[in-house]
Image (cartoon, rainbow, N blue to C red):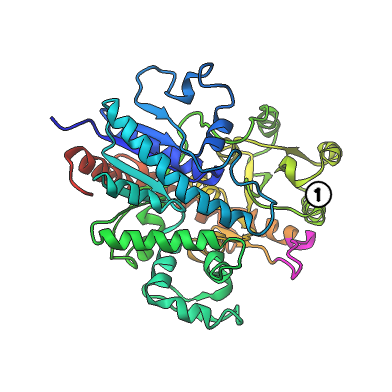
Amino acid sequence: MSPRPHFLVLTFPLQGHIAPALRLARRLLAAAPDALVTFSTTEAAHRRMFPTKPADNPQAAAEPNGDGRLEFHPFADGTESGYVRGSDSAAFNEYMASLRAAGARSVGELVDALAARGRPVTRVVYTLLLPWAADVARARGVPSALYWIQPAAVFAVYYHYFHGHAGVVADHLHDPSFLVRLPGLPPQAVRDLPSFITESAEPHDRFHGAYTAIRNLFENLDRDAPKATVLVNTCEELEASTLTAVGAYDVLPIGPVLPAGDEAGLFERDDARYMEWLDAKPADSVVYVSFGSLARMVPEQLDELLLGLEESGRPYLCVVRKDQVPEAETEPLLSRNGMVVEWCDQVRVLAHAAVGCFITHCGWNSVLESVACGVPMVVVPQWSDQRINSWLVEREWRVGTRAVVGSDGVLRAAELRRCIGMAMRREGAAGDERSAATELKRRVVEALGKGGSSDRNLMAFVEGVSSGVHV
């Protein structure tokens, strides 16, 4: 008798990785009623998700419903507190080396311990920056699948870069406007390619560890090609042409993978005053602003941001993390034309009828949530995949406007006002982004619905695991 399908979902310890990985874990449970899932991230991130001791918090090991289908078990990364942002330039690369060594050993021990409990893992699913997870799975005869939490367009760029096209990028780093032509993809300016290949390829770069991890990831996929499985957090309706640009692997678009119910995360919950505030605003009137869990904001940028929002004449809800501004300066902001919070339930906010546009750093989770809610965007990309994400939003889907940032990296108030005006144009006006966003939302809903493209792909993956087929 074959064991129950059991997915070990491993993720890098950042909010932007944990959220989509946990959402996928819950989707897998919903798609396969007999399946088990073990969710695992590093010990430091696990403690932030579940701040009480395991003895006091049963969810730290298993879901409180008591059926034991979803369990949470951390793995070691060789540190006490994980990677600390703002440390010296070598800190991230040192952390990645520690994570690779300690993580591989710890995850191997976890797989063995689960098997000894009578809960053997039948498929390892891992997010990017954990390429060694595939080695651990392979050593134990367990098939693995990469869960790509960025768009297929970014996956395709990395694929071609690491398969013969690195030279053309390296030769034109001095010319940011040079158009790189990769197979099956529209031409992309060097400045819009992922920062990990335009800025981090050299060993001395502070994020070279990310470059190395992504390179190793494709080396691992190539070992299993053409049977290497890649689950992508996108759908055919969003990136149909791009998905055909990578034929070397079994690429399954299963997204957008959106939250269902309450989520564990890395940040404390704010109270719900902002929802009551939104309830009192007219439809499509509010500008929502959030630059994600990692983006840095210099004081000058915060000043320009709030000035532009005030001068737009529209009510705004703005997320400003504690580490983005001194606590003493946040209180005066609360009395202005908008509301400033440290955290909010972003999907609830985007789904609210009062929200008319979203000013975002263009992280992929935020982009997908906005698309799923039919909200046009003003995009302010900074690094990693965000530049290509913004290209999709502005050029491919036409549901947003990319803000022009000054040479000093600061988005000025006047430019912000212009972009808000573009995104908030009334429905039916020339170049109306709202109508395009509404149509894109409809297509995404179809993809996720019963029998839709993403639903079919996820079911094919789950059924392959259940039957023992290497999908």
User: 93 or 419: nearer the eye?
Assistant: 93
Question: In the image, is 302 to the left or to the right of 119?
Answer: right
User: 297 or 163: nearer the eye?
Assistant: 163
**Residue in the picture at 81% in, 49% down:** 310
Is residue 362 among the parts visible in the rendering? no
**Region in magenta:** 405-415
Is residue 106 among the parts visible in the rendering? yes
Question: In the image, is 259 to the left or to the right of 470?
Answer: right
Q: Quadrant of the N terminus?
A: top left
Which secondary structure lies at badge 1? Answer: helix
Residue 260 position by quadrant: top left
Q: Amino acid at mark 1?
A: Glu
Instruction: Please say if 253 is above or below 176.
Output: above
Across and down, in percent, residue 161 comes to 43, 72
How would you classify the magenta stretch by its main secondary structure? loop
Residue 185 position by quadrant: bottom left
Instruction: Please say if 42 is above or below 453.
Output: above
Across and down, in percent, residue 69 comes to 34, 25
**Residue in the picture at 71% in, 31% down:** 277
Q: Is residue 410 magenta?
A: yes
**Residue wearing tag 1:** 310
**Residue in the picture at 42% in, 43% down:** 257
Across and down, in percent, residue 9 comes to 39, 40
Instruction: Please say if 55 is above or below 342.
Output: above
In this rendering, the count of numbered labels is 1
**Residue in the picture at 49% in, 39% down:** 76
Q: Residues within 10 Å of mark 1 (few under 14, many from 20)?
A: some
Across and down, in percent, residue 38 comes to 37, 33
Q: Is residue 169 magenta?
A: no
Question: In the image, is 102 to the left or to the right of 415?
Answer: left
